Image (cartoon, helix red, strand yellow):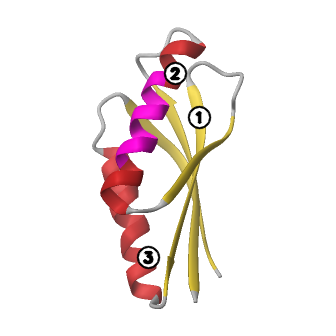
Amino acid sequence: MIVCSCEIEILIYQANSLKEKRQVVKSIIERIKSKFNASVAEVGYNDLWNRALVGVAVVSNNKKICQSSVDKILSFIDNDERVEILNYNREIF
């Protein structure tokens, strides 16, 4: 079993309050869950209105499939005009 995890730090352009931030982050999380069948959650920066730390985990029996899934998720987030990826940290177990 191969587990690929990734912490993604994002900057949210349209958020002027925590409520607006949660709407954007929740939208991104739900779309990733449905499109990529990955486990996703907001794991940090809960009190900042313009930043979020999103954790993603993918499980497979093939390392290349795991890496490819995380790459596609990063690309998906990067193509969202509401946010910008500031940093990410990927680990494979």
Residue 1 covered by magenta stretch: no
* Residue 19, percent from left and from top: 54, 14
Q: Is residue 11 above or below residue 79?
A: above
Query: In this figure, which residue is indicated by the disc labeled 1?
Result: 52
Query: SS class of the residue under badge 1?
Result: strand
Q: Give how far apart the Cα atoms at labels 2 and 3 are.
A: 28 Å
Q: Residues within 10 Å of mark 2 (few under 14, many from 20)?
A: many
Q: Residue at x 52, y 21 (%)?
A: 21
Residue 25 covered by magenta stretch: yes
Which span is picked out in magenta? 23-31
Q: Give how far apart the Cα atoms at labels 1 and 2 are.
A: 8 Å
Q: Quadrant of the N terminus?
A: bottom right
Q: Amino acid at mark 3?
A: Gln
Query: In this figure, which residue is indicated by the disc labeled 2?
Result: 21
- Looking at the image, is mark 2 or mark 3 earlier in the sequence? 2
Query: SS class of the residue under badge 3?
Result: helix
Q: Give how far apart the Cα atoms at labels 3 and 1 are.
A: 22 Å
Q: Amino acid at mark 1?
A: Ala
* Residue 4, percent from left and from top: 55, 73
Q: Are the residues tagged 2 and 3 within 8 Å (C-beta)?
A: no
Q: Amino acid at mark 2?
A: Lys
Q: Is residue 41 above or below residue 56?
A: above
